[in-house]
Image (spheres, rainbow, N blue to C red):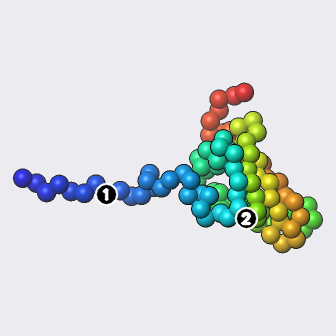
Amino acid sequence: MGVAAPRSSNGWARRGRLCIFAGMSDGEFTAKAGALWGTIPKEARARILANVFCVKCRDSVTIINFNGEERNGDVILKGACAKCGHEVVRVVETSEHDNSGN
Ligand SMILES: [Zn+2]
């Protein structure tokens, strides 16, 4: 009889969607925003968070202490500029993933 090979799990499917909350501090997401945010690849999320435009710095900055809400299928991230603390908002267009049209 053959040896029952353990199913090799590459892990990606097992990672809970909620792990985004664990790594990212204070983020408070609405359920809907959290679900949408979870559909974005981790690398893309990191890039988004590190490229938020701050009107005060006139530059792309990292958003901190952000929370998220859903609007028209997109995620709105509201937080503070890591450099100067000014409020920054980033619209993350996730609607392209799910074109259900409103
Ligand atoms: Zn700033």
Which mark, by number, is residue 29? none
Is residue 53 rendered to the left or right of residue 75? right
User: Which of the marked residues, 2 or 1, is nearer the chain's N terminus?
Assistant: 1
Q: Residues within 10 Å of mark 2 (few under 14, many from 20)?
A: some
Q: Residue at x 17, y 54 (%)?
A: 4
Q: Which residue is mark 2?
A: 50
Disc 2 residue lies near ligand 1 with CB under 8 A: no
Q: Circle 1 — which element?
A: loop
Mark 1 C-beta to ligand 1 under 8 Å: no
Q: Residue furthest top?
A: 102
Q: How many marks?
A: 2
User: Compared with residue 32, is residue 59 higher up or lower down, i.e. above or below?
Assistant: below
**Mark 1 packing: few (<14 Cα in 10 Å), some, or many (20+)?**
few
Extreme residue in the right direction: 56
From the viewer's perspective, is 44 left or right of 67?
A: left
* In this picture, residue 3 sits left or right of residue 66: left
The answer to which of 28 and 17 lies nearer the viewer is 28
Q: Identify whether 79 is placed above or below 94.
A: below
Residue 59 appearing in the image: no
Q: Amino acid at mark 1?
A: Ser
Spot occupied by residue 38 in the image (x, y as percentages of width and height): 60, 49
Q: CA distance from mark 2 to mark 1?
A: 34 Å
- Image position, residue 61 (x, y; %): 80, 66
Asked if residue 96 shows in the view, the reply is yes
Residue 74, quarter of the rendered image: top right
Q: Is residue 12 left or right of residue 85?
A: left
Q: Residue at x 65, y 57 (%)?
A: 45
Q: Which residue is mark 1?
A: 8
Q: Quadrant of residue 57?
A: bottom right
The x, y position of residue 64, in whole percent, is 76, 64
**Which residue occupies the foreground of this view, 92 or 35?**
35
